Image (spheres, helix red, strand yellow):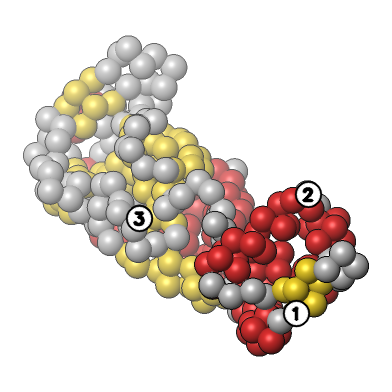
Amino acid sequence: MDRLHCLRAFQTVVDAGGFAAAARVLDVSAASVTRMVAELEAQLGVRLLQRTTRRVVLTDEGAAYLDRVRRILADLDEADALVSQRSHTVSGVLRVLATPVLASVLVAPIVPRLTAQHAALRVEVDVESYAIPSVEEHDVALFAVEGVVDTGLIARRIASGVSALVAAPAYVRRMGAPSHPDELVRHHCLRYRPPGQHAHAWTLWPPDRPEQKVRVAVEPRACSNHLEALLRMALDGGGIVSVSLDLVAQRLASGELERVLDGWVTDHWSLYAALPSRRHLPARTRAFLDELARQTAALLHT
């Protein structure tokens, strides 16, 4: 027995003045309404309605029960309306997980715009270094991986691009620019080290000739699992770093950084937003993903 349907059937019979009228209101058969009220009475062990050929009349127990049923159904309807409204309103707490560089470059510019547009929204940003995120405690978790990878997560691809080598002009003036990947062994290389892994060799190739890959085993002058720290070292003239060209597009345009081994790339990458579920995304999550797409598109076209 569906208790809620039986309660609604009982209330509707009383309000509509009969079983046939209630059936028309509920868009079910009169037999179904009769059965639901009978099941409710059997469950309670009391008669709620006196049935005659002309009308139905509440018993004393039925009148007392109806008063409570009205309050219960009204509370349920109010709760349904509240949740339905919230699902279409950008409100509540949005919990975002991001790596340090993604938090700085992508998430930080989004948050002020979202909270300015939606007064009932709060945003919590957790910043951690990870390869593949855990999404259980977050609405959205951002991560970038090489190529298109099956991580087992429910994830939406936001963008893709390439990484290449960059350095500060001061470093290039001091140390010179390599003309071939093999010359990197004589340079100060700043290496990203994924959490729990060792810095591996750089593999470079011309984008239009991916089969011509060159693998260079370099001994890094510095390595870190924090890409922003490596970028800071590179900006201060500390060496050459591999980074997404989109993330440093503004610094390249301003002259703070310049390409090293222009015409060679080190990675193909994809940016993903991992989600706890594909269904029933809250409005706050949809609003964040829309802003993320716009922010990423702006970077890609800088």
Residue 268 falls in image quadrant: top left
Q: Residue at left 45%, top 35%?
A: 161
Q: Picture coordinates of residue 114 (x, y %)?
A: 60, 69
116, above or below 96, in the image: below
Distance CA(mark 2)–CA(mark 1): 22 Å
Q: Quadrant of the N terminus?
A: bottom right
**Residue type (three-letter) at the residue carrying disc 1:** Leu
Numbered disc 1: secondary structure: strand
295 relative to 189 in the view: left or right: right
Q: Residue at left 60%, top 66%?
A: 40
202, above or below 136, in the image: above
**Residue type (three-letter) at the residue carrying disc 3:** Val
Q: Disc 2 vs disc 3: which is toward the camera?
A: 2
> Residue under circle 1?
58
Q: Residue at left 44%, top 57%?
A: 140
Q: Picture coordinates of residue 242 (x, y %)?
A: 30, 41
Numbered disc 3: secondary structure: loop
Of label 2 and label 3, which has the lower sequence position? 2
Numbered disc 2: secondary structure: loop
Q: Is residue 192 visible?
A: yes
226, above or below 60, in the image: above
Asked whether disc 2 touches disc 1, contact meaning CB atoms under 8 Å apart, the reply is no
Q: Residue at left 64%, top 74%?
A: 47
Q: Picture coordinates of residue 29 (x, y %)?
A: 78, 49
Distance CA(mark 2)–CA(mark 3): 46 Å
> Residue under circle 2?
29
126 relative to 160 in the view: left or right: left
Of label 3 and label 1, which has the lower sequence position? 1
